Image: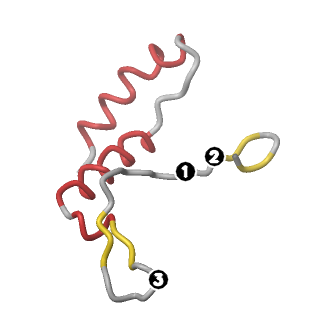
């Protein structure tokens, strides 16, 4: 239930626009994803070349594609 989150976003939307950006749900989703990866580190891992060892990452990289007039960025 994101009722409170959406109310916060709407309440701060104009302030964000005055600073030159849009306050969308994606930033909150990204923050939640990183929190989950911190709590469950095996989801933030990969297999080595032999596929025998799990490599746990100590960093979080979340990629997001954004539709712009010039295409996806």
Task: Give the image location of residue 37, x and y in percent.
Answer: 27, 58
Binning the other alpha carbons within 10 Å of mark 3 as few (below 14), some (14 to 19) or many (20 upward) gives few
Q: In which image quadrant can residue 45 be found?
A: bottom left
Binning the other alpha carbons within 10 Å of mark 1 as few (below 14), some (14 to 19) or many (20 upward) gives few
Helix, strand, or loop for circle 2? loop
Q: Is residue 27 above or below residue 44?
A: above
Q: Give left or right: position of 27 versus 66.
A: left
| Marks 1 and 3, how far apart at CA | 26 Å
Q: Is residue 59 above or below residue 40?
A: above
Q: In which image quadrant can residue 54 be found?
A: bottom left
Q: Which residue is mark 3?
A: 49
Residue at x-position 42% and y-position 41%: 25
Q: Which residue is mark 1?
A: 64
Label 2–label 1 contact, CB within 8 A: yes
Helix, strand, or loop for circle 1? loop
Between residue 72 and residue 12, name the one nearer to us: 72
Disc 3 or disc 2, which is closer to the eye?
3
Q: Which residue is mark 2?
A: 66
Label 1–label 3 contact, CB within 8 A: no
Between residue 10 and residue 65, name the one nearer to us: 65
Residue at x-position 33% and y-position 37%: 6
Task: Give the image location of residue 24, x and y in percent.
Answer: 47, 36
Instruction: Determine the residue located farthest toward the left in the rendered image.
Output: 39
Q: Is residue 9 above or below residue 25?
A: above
């Amino acid at each position: 239930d994101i009722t409170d989150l959406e109310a916060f976003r709407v309440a701060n939307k104009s302030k964000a626009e005055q600073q030159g950006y849009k306050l969308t749900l994606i930033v909150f989703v990204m923050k939640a994803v990183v929190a989950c990866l911190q709590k469950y580190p095996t989801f933030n891992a990969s297999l080595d070349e032999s596929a025998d060892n799990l490599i746990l990452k100590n960093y979080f990289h979340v990629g997001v594609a954004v539709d712009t007039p010039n295409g996806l960025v």
